[in-house]
Image: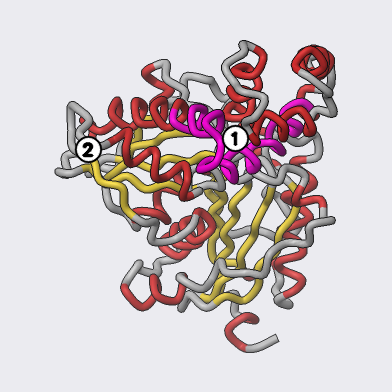
């Protein structure tokens, strides 16, 4: 163990989503010491969420040869952790906070909703709106004074990957799809159905299955929807519908930010998919009551968590730190047979 690590000159960032948990240990200069990936952290999606987070945290420390007692700060952005002003209440917060408890970990800790770290990473502290969509979904604005506001506070919810897939299935059941559409065939195969009547029966059977299993089934279909977006009128219709709902949430929040235009960043496996992203850009074009501008995220959500942890440790987010964090969260693709990939289209974010 080198001297810097022995002195505890590192912070911990955690991005806990519905499908994956990622933990990064980073030196105070922004240098990556380790990164580990584990199963989902959201209690509403994962029965073993607490263990997933705790084991991933322990592995990240172990792989870097770090002692938990030496950490200077920890910031975790967790799916299922409700903001104080959330319309959903604070039902899961105690369980989520327990998941970042580890023997010897005595540093200052902050547990936030994962959309907050996504916002911090994507906009690097600027006021604006972030769209997070993958396993779950949230649209969150943070203004120039640091106050946050989500579209759910207006009773709005756009939807996530599984909602996209459900919309496709409903269109087929309602006869809004041609049998010649490539997605029509793909959906029947996904549900092991020979025809629309078979699909109806499969959907009804799934409605009585375990809730998380049903969500996984729909979530696993979503990447096939986006993959066929340019060949399938059915996929295009569902993607445009979700993009319109998302754009409405952005427009509800835009007046809370003074910037003109209001910067809007997208993170998450669905929100950042170029086929969804292009349709969202069209849906936002010329929207009222405020102008908006889609911008590329500066850092991913894990980078946002690390950035907040460094700030808690007294490290300013200067250009050198931001440049170092650009490579912090880069890691090889996960093992497709591993538990972290239970939902092929999963990402982070909370909600229904």
- x 52%, y 39%: residue: 133
> In the rendered view, would you say 187 is above or below 298?
above
Q: Is residue 161 visible?
A: yes
Colouring mode (rainbow / by chain / secondary structure / one colour): secondary structure
Which residue is label 2 attached to?
257
The reply, left or right, for residue 141 in relation to residue 77 is left
Residue 263 locus on image (x, y percent): 27, 47
The reply, left or right, for residue 272 in relation to residue 174 is left
* Magenta span of residues: 214-240
Image quadrant assignment for residue 194? top right
Which residue is label 1 attached to?
161
- x 36%, y 56%: residue: 296
> In the rendered view, would you say 304 is above or below 257?
below
Q: Quadrant of the N terminus?
A: bottom right
- x 45%, y 71%: residue: 326
Residue 290 locus on image (x, y percent): 18, 33
Q: Is residue 348 visible?
A: no
**Comparing marks 2 and 1, which lies closer to the viewer?**
1
- x 56%, y 57%: residue: 74
Please tell me whether residue 212 belongs to the stretch shown in magenta. no
Which one is earlier in the sequence, the residue at label 2 or at label 1?
A: 1
| Residue situated in front as seen by the camera: 237 or 293 | 237
Q: Secondary structure at mark 1?
A: helix
Crowd class of label 1 (few under 14; some 14 to 19; many from 20; radius 10 Å)? many
Image quadrant assignment for residue 259? top left
Q: Do the residues under discs 2 and 1 have CB atoms within 8 angstroms?
A: no
Q: How many marks overall?
A: 2
| Residue situated in front as seen by the camera: 244 or 175 | 175
């Amino acid at each position: 163990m080198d001297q810097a690590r022995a002195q505890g000159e590192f912070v911990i960032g955690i991005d806990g989503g519905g499908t994956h948990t990622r933990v990064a240990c980073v030196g105070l200069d922004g240098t990556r010491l380790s990164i580990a990936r584990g199963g989902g952290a959201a209690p509403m999606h994962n029965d073993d969420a607490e263990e997933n987070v705790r084991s991933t945290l322990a592995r990240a420390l172990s792989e870097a040869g770090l002692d938990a007692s030496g950490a200077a700060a920890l910031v975790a952005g967790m799916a299922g952790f409700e903001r104080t002003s959330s319309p959903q209440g604070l039902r899961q917060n105690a369980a989520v906070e327990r998941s970042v408890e580890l023997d010897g970990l005595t540093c200052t800790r902050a547990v936030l909703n994962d959309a907050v770290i996504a916002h911090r990473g994507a906009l690097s502290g600027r006021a604006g709106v972030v769209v997070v969509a993958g396993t779950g979904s949230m649209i969150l604005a943070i203004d120039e004074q640091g106050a946050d506001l989500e579209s759910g506070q207006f009773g709005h919810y756009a939807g996530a990957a599984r909602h996209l897939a459900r919309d496709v299935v409903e269109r087929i059941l309602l006869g809004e799809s041609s049998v010649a559409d490539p997605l029509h065939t793909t959906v029947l195969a996904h549900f092991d159905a020979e025809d629309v009547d078979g699909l109806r029966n499969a959907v009804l059977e799934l409605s009585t299955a375990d809730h998380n299993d049903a969500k996984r089934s729909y979530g696993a279909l979503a990447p096939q929807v986006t993959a066929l977006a340019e060949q399938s009128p059915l996929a295009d219709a569902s993607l445009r519908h979700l993009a319109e709902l998302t754009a409405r949430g952005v427009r509800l929040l835009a007046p809370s930010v003074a910037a003109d235009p209001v910067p809007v960043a997208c993170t998450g496996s669905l929100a950042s998919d170029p086929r969804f992203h292009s349709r969202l850009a069209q849906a936002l074009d010329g929207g009222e009551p405020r102008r908006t501008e889609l911008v590329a995220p500066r850092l991913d959500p894990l980078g946002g968590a690390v950035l907040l942890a460094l700030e808690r440790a007294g490290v300013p987010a200067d250009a050198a730190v931001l440049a170092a964090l650009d490579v912090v969260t880069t890691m090889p693709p996960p093992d497709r047979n591993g538990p972290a990939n239970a939902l092929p289209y999963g990402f982070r974010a909370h909600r229904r």
